[in-house]
Image: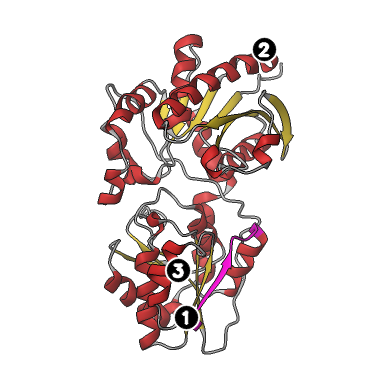
Amino acid sequence: MNEKKLHILQLPSIYIPHGGQFVRNQAQALQEKGLIVNVLANVGINLRGFRKKYFTLPYFSYISKEDGLEVYRLFTRIIPKLVKWNHIIWAKRTVRLFEKYIKKYGKPDIIHAHFALWGGYAAFLIKQKYGIPYIITEHFSIMSNLCEYSRNKFKNWETPYYSAAYSNADFITPVSKLQIPKIRTFLTKDVPISPVTNVINTDFFYYKERKNDAEKINFVTVNGFYFQKGYDILIPAFDTACKQNPNIELTVVGENFEKKEFQNTLWKKVKHKDKFHFTGELTSDGVRNELWKADCYLMPSRAEGQPQATLEALCTGLPMVCTNVIPDSVAVKENSIMIQMENIELMTEAILKMSDTYKNYDNKSISEHAVNICCKDTFCKEIMKVY
């Protein structure tokens, strides 16, 4: 007799084209293992960043075959300034979308929500009505709660929604153990919690030997210009380091560096502008090429969960300088110089130390360590135990 395949419904809070690639990666990995995996994607469209193409998006739900996955889609328009109202409406519309879903696909065995707010809260509402168990994978970087920036991001009105989502989950799988203490503050009863890794396409981001015999030392970082990414620390730190080591250069891959906030504050103070190279946002191929051209990776963030860009860099074999928001299972002494976040002087010292020692690292071992953490097989083994 054939064993019934487990039916998993992925319920992300964000999804392609506005983020959530990690959900697609996880769903594809599980599908390859023989599970029935579909995606329920209610994508919020913020009218503040209005674009003409949003007019052409349908107002009704529909099914789309994407990257080998069945995606039940809906686009919900977000009204500016009505933050709480928008999220509650999003959750209720997601429940209605789920009710359409089960008419076609039947009830899933498990709902796998991503982020407590608001996919986890929608899963809680569904469980109340249909009794379907759910797990929450928490990706939210501020849940690590290591600095004032993160702590100030939590709003009092969100607490009952976090509490309902987490406390009624059947399992919680944060991407980092650093998130667990904050998650526990929202629990009103015991819920099992265990970290489960993100999954990286390690067949794509793979080790490649570098042959850099030139004096120039190439650093790279992959992140857009956002406060949590710590460019207000990295840019002046690297500029100062250039004064002591004129052979270092930094390639920055990411968006938003044309903004006045960057140009009129950080950039105009930089004295060694010729040492910085901004590529803008790149495709995966472009990112990989920049990683392969580099000697070292920089991660200056003040808030992270388990950042995919960092894992991708490690998979290609790059040693890195990072802040202490990276899980210590990822950043070890064999691949990293880890420093306290939000410290320009420590970042400068670490950049200079890395420029002196990067050739001492075993790049292939760095790649193997990262691949063991975040490859498809590791992820599927861990998450299927939870299922």
Mark 3: amino acid: Gln
SS of the residue under disc 1: helix
In contact (CB < 8 Å): disc 2 and disc 3: no
Q: Is residue 367 magenta?
A: no
- Decide if residue 377 is on the left or right side of residue 304: right
Residue located 43% across and 56% down the image: 226
The foreground one among 369 and 52 is 52
The quadrant in which the N terminus is found is top right
Is disc 3 surrounded by few (<14), some (14 to 19) or many (20+) residues within 10 Å? few
Mark 1 highlights which residue?
A: 273
Mark 3 highlights which residue?
A: 263
Q: Which numbered disc flags the more N-terminal residue, 2 or 3?
A: 2
| Range shown magenta | 274-284
Mark 1: amino acid: Lys
Q: Is residue 241 above or below residue 11?
A: below
Of the residues tagged 2 and 1, which is closer to the observer?
1
Q: Which numbered disc flags the more N-terminal residue, 1 or 3?
A: 3
Q: CA distance from mark 1 to mark 3?
A: 12 Å
